[in-house]
Image (cartoon, grey):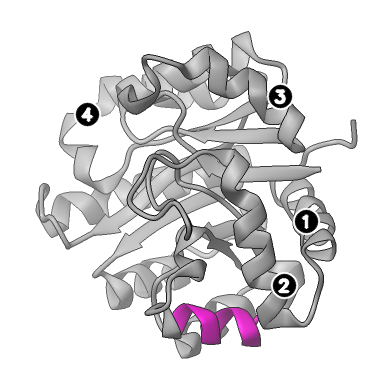
């Protein structure tokens, strides 16, 4: 079974054919999808998707670009969503200095608050980090909690930094970028990382793999990611699918079905 460990099917890119796409996934061996919140509104939509579809689980969290909407009242609401039956992680949370939509101090404040919420609830964490390598590492080292497994979603930094995260027991999220010709650092990272610490993800509707680069992404494209990882690791795509399914079940604490 293929597990998409990070998707955004609540995104407006799926408004016209969401049902059609989701119903088709199991015909393409996608057995479980983790739909990930990126704002208060998308967390609300994510909870609704988990209630409608048996194979969708969710993560509740606020992306660094959206943390300006957080306050004590809304943070209390977010905590309540984390207690929903099929919410299995806190995320995506972190730092993003690329767009600079929210200032660094505000991003750091709510990153730490959401990390501590995950620690309190002993839930896994999905970390978003873009153009913020040093600050992300510093905060994660300071806030490290062995009861909260961490995945660095859409990993984009150096193999050396990946080694640091792997030594901390973290996982790396690998998606369509692994199929891009210019993804040299990511390919080197996947070559050196234990396959047992890799999670396959789409980040759909974004980051579609070759041969669909630039088009809307969905979980059916994960076979291309499995093939690319397999080429780098000397494994078949089937072996990659099997191991990454086990990894995702372990990370998100999903029972065998």
The C terminus: image quadrant = top right
Q: Secondary structure at mark 4?
A: loop
* N-term-proximal mark, 2 vs 1: 2
Contact, CB < 8 Å: mark 1 with mark 4? no
Task: Examine the structure image and report whether residue 87 is included in the region drawn in magenta.
Answer: no
Magenta highlight range: 185-193
Q: State the residue position of label 3.
A: 55
* N-term-proximal mark, 3 vs 2: 3
Instruction: Name the residue furthest right.
Output: 256
Q: State the residue position of label 2.
A: 230
Distance from the alpha carbon under mark 4 to that under mark 3: 32 Å
Q: Image quadrant of residue 243?
A: bottom right
Could you tell me if residue 13 is visible in this image?
A: yes
Nearer to us of marks 2 and 4 is: 2
Q: Secondary structure at mark 2?
A: helix
Residue 43 position (above or below residue 125): above
On the image, the x and y values in percent for residue 191 come to: 63, 85
């Amino acid at each position: 079974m293929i597990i998409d460990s990070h998707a955004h099917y609540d995104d407006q890119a799926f408004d016209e054919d969401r049902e059609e796409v989701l119903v088709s996934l199991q015909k393409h061996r996608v057995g479980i999808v983790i739909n990930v919140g990126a704002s208060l509104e998308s967390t609300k939509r994510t909870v609704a998707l988990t209630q409608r579809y048996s194979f969708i689980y969710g993560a509740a969290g606020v992306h660094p670009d959206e943390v300006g909407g957080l306050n004590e009242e809304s943070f209390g609401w977010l905590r309540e969503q984390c207690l929903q039956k099929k919410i299995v992680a806190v995320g995506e949370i972190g730092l993003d200095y690329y767009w600079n939509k929210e200032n660094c101090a505000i991003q750091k404040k709510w990153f730490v608050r959401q990390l501590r919420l995950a620690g309190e609830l002993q839930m896994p964490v999905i970390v978003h980090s873009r153009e913020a390598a040093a600050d992300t590492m510093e905060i994660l080292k300071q806030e490290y909690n062995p009861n909260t497994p961490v995945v660095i979603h859409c990993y984009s930094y150096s193999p050396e930094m990946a080694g640091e995260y792997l030594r901390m027991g973290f996982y790396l999220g690998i998606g369509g970028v692994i199929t891009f010709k210019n993804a040299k650092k990511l390919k080197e990272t996947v070559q050196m990382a234990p396959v047992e610490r890799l999670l396959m993800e789409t980040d759909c509707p974004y980051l579609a793999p070759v041969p669909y680069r630039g088009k809307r992404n969905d979980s059916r494209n994960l076979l291309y990611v499995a093939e690319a990882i397999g080429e780098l690791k000397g494994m078949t795509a089937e072996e990659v699918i099997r191991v990454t399914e086990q990894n995702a079940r372990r990370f998100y604490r999903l029972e065998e079905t």
